[in-house]
Structures are given as structure tokens and as C-alpha cells.
Image (tube, rainbow, N blue to C red):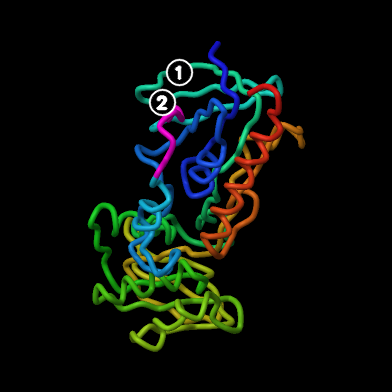
Amino acid sequence: MEHYDILIIGGGVAGIAAAKAAGGARVLLAESRPQLGGVLLQCAHHGFGKDKSGTEYAAELLQDFPEEITLALNTTVLSVSENRTALLSGRGFGRKRIGFSRLILATGCREIPMGALPIAGTRPKGVYTAGQMQELMNLHGFVPEGPAVILGSGDLGLIMARQLAQAGIDVTLVEKKDSCGGMTRNRRCLEEYPIRLLCSDTIREVRGYPHITGCVTASGECLPCKTLLIAAGMVPERELVSHLGNPDWLHICGNCCAVHPMVEAVANEGKQAGIAATEKLGGAL
């Protein structure tokens, strides 16, 4: 069985930073997508680093990436065991079990889907998470039908409200809190575009089948729509190691530790994890 000093799971910001910081160690970086960069690759908007887009920030982060690091792209880590082995499966890498001395989890976070919310009705076509729509529009050139309703006015909800409005689509934001969320720079879209904001409200029902035709708010208003985006928040993705407890060989960093509002904090946390894992190896190097 092949053995690595450090196994890094996740090739987004935290995973890349951890790999670059793990100097001198034999490192395997496993990423389920075909290239490194994670969610940055679908972020066309600016605001990363010094006003870069997500792809620009990823490209800068990948500069001087160590050639000696083994990359397993299009590869999913299926399980991690207490005896410090992991089962991997992927295109090109195959299906194999490897051993490791230390593990860095950098799997990021996942979106809360509509199925996790108390929304009545069917599950028609035209319902997406905000991140799914971001990927469809920016990587695949997809343009959804309008009008659109977005549940949640956090940063991702506001970013997608702006992008839909720029595409000429009527947008309504529904926010359960009494005020809009998100950073100031993202809230500016409410001033720059005719985006309607409904606060202190939520969606209680979707209508239409097989395609969505509208949704009903808790206040009773019926909002016609052909696209519904769920931007209800993010949850750290840690299920892969949830059964392990807290072993001293496990390092968790980035958004799978806690959801960060700024990408620089994710990169710094990944870097610190790479340094810590290497230092813990000690004389093994």
C-alpha cells in the first residue's frame, strides 16, 4: 500500500495553501473536480484579494505550486479510517487504498438545499441553490428564465441577484431577517438595479409542476417566478471525518472548519495547517 506523509482532501483555497506550506513532505492532494481552485473557478465577480475575480485569485494562488506534490484530480476520497488509511476512487487515479501519517481536511462547505427547509409543495424544475446557478452561468453559459426569486440576502444571494439583474431578469430577494445581509459592497446592487427586497418574510410554498410558476411567502404574497434560487446559508463539510473524534493527526482548515467571509482568512488557515502538519511529522521527514 502506497504511503504519504500528508494527505490533503480538497483542492480549493485552503487545500492549495496547505500543500504549498507543506515543504519537504511527501504530499498527496485529492480533488474531486478536474482542476484545482474549488469554488473560486465559478466566481466571475470581483472582491477576492486586491479586487480580483475568483479565477484570477486562484491563478495567483497556484503560482509556484510545488511540482513534487502528487495530484489526484477527478478523485473522491470515499472513506478515512482510524488506522490512517483512506480509500480513493477517481478517473486516472483508479480505486485504491493509501496510507498517510497526517491528514488535512480542506473540503469547504456545502449549501443548504430547499429539501432541508420547511417549504411546502412539489419539487419542480427551475429550483436551484445559488451556488449551482453561479456555476451554470459562469462555467456553462446558462441563462435562466425570469422572473427570479432568491431566498436569502447574504453575500451569495446578493451576488446572484446582481448577476441575474445584469442579464435583464427581474429579481426579488426574500429575507427572513428584518434587514438585508451581506457585505456593503454586495448590498450596492440594491441601489444599482431594480431588485426588490422583502424583509421579515420567507417562502412557505412553491407552486407549479413540472416547472415552477411561483412561490408564496409567509406573509401570503404570491410571487410569480420561473427560477427560484435558495441562498439559505452554508454548512461546513466534515462528514468524512465525523466518526474519528479528534485524533492528533487530523488538521481541519478553511470553510470546513467554519464558514469564512473572506478568502484571505481561508488561505491563511490552510497555510497554517500545512505548516503544523509538517512540523508534527518531525523526524519522519
Report which quarter residue 44 is drawn in.
bottom left
Q: Residue at x 44, y 64 (%)?
A: 48
**Quadrant where the image shows the C terminus:** top right
From the viewer's perspective, is residue 227 above or below residue 72? below
- Looking at the image, do the residues carrying marks 2 and 1 touch, with CB atoms under 8 Å apart? yes
Left or right relative to 102: residue 78: left
Q: Residue at x 54, y 36 (%)?
A: 9
Instruction: Residue 29: give x, y in percent of width and height.
Output: 49, 33
**Quadrant where the image shows the N terminus:** top right
- Is 86 or 22 nearer to us in this picture? 22
Q: Which residues are magenta?
A: 64-72
From the viewer's perspective, is residue 249 above or below residue 87? below
- Is 49 or 283 nearer to us in this picture? 283
Residue at the top extreme, as displayed: 1
Give the class, few, some or many, for how many residues have Cα within 10 Å of label 1's Cα (few <14, many ≥20).
Answer: some
Give the class, few, some or many, for how many residues have Cα within 10 Å of label 2's Cα (few <14, many ≥20).
Answer: some
Whether 163 is among the magenta residues is no
Left or right relative to 111: residue 100: right
Q: Residue at x 46, y 83 (%)?
A: 197
Report which quarter residue 165 is drawn in.
bottom left
Amino acid at dot 2: Gly
Left or right relative to 87: residue 62: left
**Residue corresponding to mark 1:** 95
Instruction: Residue 280: give x, y in percent of width and height.
Output: 71, 32
Instruction: Residue 87: give x, y in percent of width and height.
Output: 54, 22
Residue at the bottom extreme, as displayed: 191
**Residue corresponding to mark 2:** 90
